[in-house]
Image: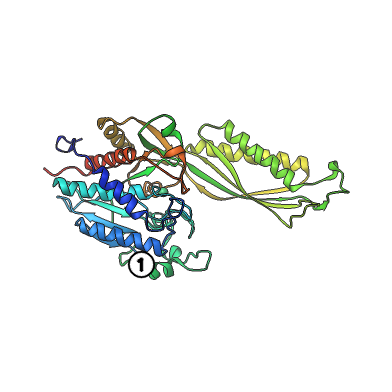
């Protein structure tokens, strides 16, 4: 950290106030936030954010997918800025911190630098990415995915929500289909502060998670075809029971993920019995599987072991099981220099810290495919997120914002 800035701290009370002020946009009775992307509450928080950025002297641009970019000039404007930020949309029963902390902490960094009269060597740019959550429109993290070129803008604009409304219509409806083509705002790198959304930091009493990796994902659609028959007159040994088959598959998934642990998880999250009836042996079931690991070799092993287990179960039970891999996202390995910078800053500021893998997906995982990126985690109460009970302490949010600020200063440089 540079000498000039090493004593600099963000304004903890101001950050805390902005988190609670914006939580009123979509506030729920249980103390959470319901702010679906591109809905009326999202427009309210976007308008608030735009005003706050402009009041802080930032030049605000909105891209064709509604992502918002607030640029703070640096001494050397020939270089692309260091980006920082997250998202302001929430789950239908979301909390006050997921995404919000990282976006409002980025604003707080700008306000603090303004108050201290600090000019960075290269510019910085704070970002609110559209639709990180993916609960109204699929896929999650769609704007950053389009930014890095995984989807065309047109493809994303044509996605529909459950009511049939397209992304394009929703953007126009709230006035946030911006003028700049996706990808116009370049970055030299990106740093995102986020709550952990898991229990590790809290359990180990660590203040800062230095995120060095993100889990890869395997998504499967499965189908079991057995034979429907009478629940009273079909002897046990003659049954071809799809649900009993699924039960074995679920336990096999649990055993395989545990065997490859601790760096592996596997979940059967959906199962639908076709034409269910109390007195009919289930003959057909559709199910999904979600397997994750931050290690590509473990992902391959999970896939191979799963397929072998399912083949054995299907043959023994004389049923057909199909398993289609519908999505494979490779693991994220965040930029080594950026990760080291976060770690050094956390240490220099005196915060307890550990390296950690992100179990959830984040916009920064997309961004890391085309630019250096890193993330900073802070603990959340009981590891709970995507829930109205989501909570984090003011002290931890402040620590995370301080690490964010000094990481950005280290990467952007302080103009002399
Ligand atoms: Zn988030």
Is residue 351 left or right of 292 when viewed as pictured? left
Q: Give residue 194's quadrant in the image.
A: top left
Name the residue nearer the viewer: 342 or 313: 342
Q: For the view shown, which residue lies furthest in the right direction?
A: 233
Question: In the image, residue 66 lies at what x, y percent?
Answer: 36, 62
> What residue do we see at 32% from left, 66% from top?
178
Question: In the image, residue 243 lies at what x, y percent?
Answer: 73, 46
Q: Can the viewer see residue 163?
A: yes
Name the residue nearer the viewer: 212 or 401: 401
The N terminus sits in image quarter: top left
Per the image, label 1 sits on a secondary structure element best described as loop
Name the residue nearer the viewer: 96 or 325: 96
Question: In the image, residue 203 lies at what x, y percent?
Answer: 44, 31
Q: Can the viewer see residue 65?
A: no
Q: Which residue is mark 1?
A: 177
Q: Residues within 10 Å of mark 1 (few under 14, many from 20)?
A: many
> What residue do we see at 59% from left, 41% from top?
303
Vertically, is 142 above or below 331? below
Q: For the view shown, which residue lies furthest in the front direction?
A: 29
Q: Is mark 1 within 8 Å of ligand 1?
A: no
Is residue 75 left or right of 44 when viewed as pictured? left
Is residue 202 left or right of 9 when viewed as pictured? right
Question: In the image, residue 89 lies at what x, y percent?
Answer: 40, 56
Q: Give residue 249's quadrant in the image.
A: top right
The C terminus sits in image quarter: top left
Q: Give residue 301's quadrant in the image.
A: top right
Q: For the view shown, which residue lies furthest in the left direction?
A: 416
Vertically, is 371 above or below 143? above
Name the residue nearer the viewer: 256 or 104: 104
Colouring method of the image? rainbow
């Amino acid at each position: 950290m540079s000498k000039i800035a090493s004593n600099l701290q963000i304004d903890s009370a101001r950050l805390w106030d902005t988190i609670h002020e914006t939580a009123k946009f979509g506030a729920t009775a249980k103390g959470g936030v319901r702010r679906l992307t591109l809905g009326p509450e999202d427009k309210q928080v976007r308008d608030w954010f735009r005003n706050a950025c402009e009041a802080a002297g930032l030049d605000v641009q909105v891209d064709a997918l509604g992502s918002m970019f607030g640029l703070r000039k640096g001494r050397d404007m020939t270089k692309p800025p260091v980006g920082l930020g997250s998202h302001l949309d929430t789950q239908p029963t979301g909390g006050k911190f997921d995404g919000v902390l990282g976006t409002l902490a980025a604003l707080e960094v700008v306000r603090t630098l303004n108050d201290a009269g600090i000019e960075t060597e290269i510019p910085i740019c704070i970002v609110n990415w559209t639709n990180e959550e993916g609960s109204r429109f699929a896929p999650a993290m769609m704007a950053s995915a389009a930014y890095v070129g995984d989807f065309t803008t047109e493809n994303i604009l044509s996605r529909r929500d459950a009511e049939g409304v397209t992304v394009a219509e929703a953007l126009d409806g709230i006035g946030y289909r911006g003028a700049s083509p996706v990808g116009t705002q370049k970055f030299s790198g990106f740093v995102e502060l986020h709550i952990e959304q898991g229990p590790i930091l809290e359990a180990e009493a660590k203040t800062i998670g230095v995120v060095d990796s993100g889990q890869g994902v395997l998504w499967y659609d499965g189908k079991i075809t057995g034979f429907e028959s009478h629940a009273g007159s079909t002897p046990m040994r003659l049954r071809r029971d799809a649900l009993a088959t699924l039960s074995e598959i679920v336990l096999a998934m649990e055993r395989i993920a545990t065997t490859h642990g601790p760096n592996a998880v596997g979940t059967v999250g959906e199962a639908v019995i076709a034409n269910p009836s109390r007195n009919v042996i289930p003959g057909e079931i559709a199910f999904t599987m979600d397997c994750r690991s931050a290690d590509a070799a473990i992902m391959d092993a999970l896939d191979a072991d799963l397929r072998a287990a399912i083949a054995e179960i299907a043959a023994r039970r004389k049923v057909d099981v199909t398993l289609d891999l519908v999505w494979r996202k490779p693991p994220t390995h965040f930029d080594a220099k950026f990760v080291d910078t976060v770690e050094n800053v956390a240490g220099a500021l005196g915060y307890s810290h550990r390296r950690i893998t992100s179990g959830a997906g984040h916009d920064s995982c997309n961004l890391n495919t085309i630019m250096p990126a890193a993330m900073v985690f802070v603990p959340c109460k009981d590891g709970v997120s995507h829930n109205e009970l989501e909570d984090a302490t003011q002290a931890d949010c402040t620590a995370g914002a301080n690490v964010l600020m000094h990481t950005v200063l280290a990467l952007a440089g302080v103009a002399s």
